[in-house]
Amino acid sequence: MIKKDRRQNLFYGILALFFSLVLFFIASGSSLQVDLSGSVNAYQEEIDAVPIQTIYDTNDYFIQGFETTVNVTLSSRNRVQLNAEKNEETRSFRVVADLSDLDVGTHEVPLEIQNISSSVSAEIEPKTVTVTIEKKVTKTYTVEPVVSTEDDSSGYAIESMVAAPQEVTITTGEQTAADIDRVVAVIDPDDIPNDSGTVSAVIEAWDINKNPLAIVADPDTVDVAITMEAPTKDVELFVTQQGTLPNGISHYIYRMSSISAALTGPQDILDQTTQIGVPVDISGITATTEQTVTIPAPDGTTINPVEVTIQITPVAQSANDSEEAAADQTSDSSTATSDNASSTSLGQESDQESVESAATSETESTN
């Protein structure tokens, strides 16, 4: 009985070992196939812009002048592990430039991969970087707001710019600090409003030729309050008469307190505007009077002055105008009389013809 149990246990043990080997071969089939054939058929992934981690004394030195990222090509026969190293959130490797044994100056430093999985290999491109090492210095500078590029297509001009805070702390190399001509807050022209407002600006240190230098600024951005000045042009003012002309008035004479005004606004509107009509209602005006009228400025603009005073002097119809009017009436009356006379004459002739016709008829009847 005991021998039978031992035989069964041995059978189950061999069966379990067999299935374990089957599962192992399934999981590692591709690796075994590569090993047996002697060929390399690994998966590959290219990773761009992998950051370089530098090792140096950050308290005493400042480094600059090197590319901060490299491209890495990963190879592996294990797709799962390869994907893990490809993903920035799950990768374990890093690219390192060790500067700890280097002194002040410019050096070509080899790059190396650290902490990578044993089942993954890596190739770095480029394999070295050129690094400049300087003694570290920290200074405080006054910030000068500037616009990165000039763009005056809208016609608006910057009246003033004030940074807050007005001072920043710059950390850089000793030689680089000596090359700093000014520290600026660079404003993107696309962020500038057409009216006053506040924008965010990036801190940069420039040399005498306005070339940006390698620095670390604290803070690295500042707020800049901008006051804008819109373009202005003088436009002509003229009266646009409205209303009904009273009886006995021929026309009006207008005297304006100003015949021009300063129009302020976007350049495209100014380009389209040369004159502005000021409306005056003359209904019922038979004596000299004055009106204060608001000048109708185009939308999106302002005008100075806002109002204009207009003296309105009516001009009565002249005697000649009255004679012409009377003559017109007389002519109309004469025409009507002539028409009536013609009608009467025609009527008389018709009656005479009727009498003569009747007399003839009577004569013929008598005969």
Image (tube, helix red, strand yellow):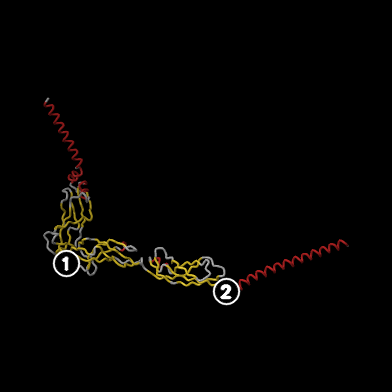
Q: Quadrant of residue 67?
A: bottom left
Residue 41 in view, yes or no: no
Q: What residue appears at the point 82 percent right and 63 percent down from the top-left corner? A: 358
Q: Kindly identify the amino acid type of the residue bearing the numbered disc 1.
A: Gln
> In the drawing, does residue 216 fall left or right of residue 151?
left
Q: Nearer the viewer, residue 156 or 364?
A: 156
Q: Quadrant of the C terminus?
A: bottom right
Q: Nearer the viewer, residue 303 or 289?
A: 289
**Residue 175, label in figure:** 1
Q: Nearer the viewer, residue 88 or 26?
A: 88
> In the drawing, does residue 125 fall left or right of residue 234?
left
Mark 2: secondary structure: loop
The percent coordinates of residue 204 (x first, y second) are: 23, 64
Mark 1: secondary structure: helix
**Residue 318, label in figure:** 2
Crowd class of label 1 (few under 14; some 14 to 19; many from 20; radius 10 Å): few
Residue 140 in view, yes or no: yes
The percent coordinates of residue 29 (x first, y second) are: 20, 42
Q: How many marks?
A: 2
Q: Quadrant of the N terminus?
A: top left
The percent coordinates of residue 184 (x first, y second) are: 24, 65
Q: CA distance from mark 1 to mark 2?
A: 93 Å
Q: Kindly identify the amino acid type of the residue bearing the numbered disc 2.
A: Ser
Tags 1 and 2 touching, CB below 8 Å: no
Q: Nearer the viewer, residue 155 or 212?
A: 155
